Image: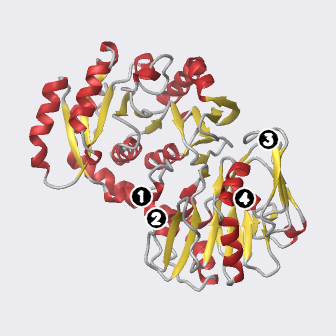
Amino acid sequence: MAALMLQGCGSDVGKSVLVAGLCRLFANRGLTVRPFKPQNMSNNAAVTAEGGEIGRAQALQALACRTAPSAYMNPVLLKPQTDVGAQLVVLGRMAGIRSARDYQGGKAALLEVVLDSYRRLATEADLVIVEGAGSPAEINLREGDIANMGFARAAGVPVVLIGDIDRGHVIAALAGAKMVLDPADAAMVQGFIINKFRGDPALFDAGREAITSLTGWPDFGLIPWLGAAARLPAEDAAPLQARRAGAGGGRLRIVVPQLPRIANFDDFDPLLQEPDVALSFIPPGTALPGDADLVILPGSKATLADLAFLRAEGWDLDLATHLRRGGRVLGICGGYQMLGRRIADPRGTEGPPGEAPGLGLLDIETILSGDKILRPVRGRGIGGGDFTGYEMHVGRTTGPALATPFLEIAGEGPHGAVAADGRIAGGYVHGLFQAGAYRATFLESLGARSLGVDHGEVVDSALDEIAGVLEQSLDLAALTQIAKPERPLT
């Protein structure tokens, strides 16, 4: 078994995409490859076949490996609920709520869980490609670390450090990392990669030489800007507005309010690929556009808090105006709960205990209690079109509006609710628009045409494209040598 860990000079330097691309590259060479991320922080999660949840990036990386996602691929997941607290998920299951201070003080206790998960994957793979979190240069977080050098040293996995030249100061970032890292941590770094380069690569030859001179680390390559990465699901909401606002130029305008704890926003990726659709994420401080055809209330990791935020922004008033003009509204998961008469969280599952009136647009109410529902589902839309997706929520919803369902889930029956006039609907199923058949039927009901392509094909082709670029851009011989394979990775 061989292993390699990609760490970065910061968040959003492209680690997740590069791991996915390398997974596909080596899978295309006939190897059994597995992705691994010891600790992740994201509200964009995926459901595993055994009913657990992991970060969306690791599910994508599993797809790149052509294998099913597993909770062992991301044993520790933090899902932020407030600025200083998060839901802790261990091996796919909720393990309570932790403040940032409490988690920082107790994370070392999770190292054995992380190492055991890694060993399980290693027994079934020719190659494990590990993704770090944030940056190892954040030395204030080094004590008890399980995400970067703490894991790398405990597992004996060699590290390659990624620098993002698109954000600038990449020479300083890599040289600075070498300067601040503990010598034993710095010794784990076997080389560096420059990512997101635009223009003539020769113009940075002197910069690469300077990094090697300043750090002593070998140069494993320079990767150009990967346009195909835009066709992959994103994991972090931070770059959401910059990357995805106002995508498309179609005549059907769909808008999504950008809630502070928006979750699983990759639900909308397939709509971004439709030429007849113009989809926008609406940032705080901006009214919902008056010319929108459809407003989608997305999933949320803290439904009551995001509902209060929605009202504080005046978006509830914008929704009322939108409906008076004949517009439509769709709620997904937390957004579906917001559409009802009332939401109650008596045990403080998603924040402080409490309750609040909903938007009153559907005759339902939701109690946030009981075990978290995590499962893949498939079915058919009431108006037609088969879909596959998943549920990921705490909460049980009841009410008269359920008599007019939004979806039909295979083996179970009606799901979700639709208002009497047919213009307001909602349900718990994420991933609805992935299936070309359902998406085509849904858009047709709004007067738009669809390409009718399953979004999985779009993602799969992007992974192959990225793998091809990496094969041309990286010193694969050097990378495979430091991964210490038991047999050649060719």
Amino acid identity at mark 4: Tyr
Horizontally, residue 314 falls left or right of residue 349, namely: left
Task: Specify few, some or many for label 3: CA neighbours under 10 Å numbering under 14, 14-19, or 20 or more.
Answer: few
Which label sits on residue 371?
3
Q: Where is residue 185 drawn, in percent x and y?
A: 34, 18
Q: What kind of element bears circle 4?
A: loop
Q: Name above or below for residue 158 compared with residue 318.
A: above
**Which mark is first along the chain, 1 or 3?**
1
Q: Quadrant of the C terminus?
A: top left
Q: Quadrant of residue 206?
A: top left
CB of mark 3 within 8 Å of CB of mark 4?
A: no
Q: Say if residue 435 shows up in the picture.
A: no
Q: Say if residue 239 shows up in the picture.
A: yes
Q: Quadrant of residue 435?
A: bottom right
Which label sits on residue 428?
4
Badge 2 is on which residue?
A: 245
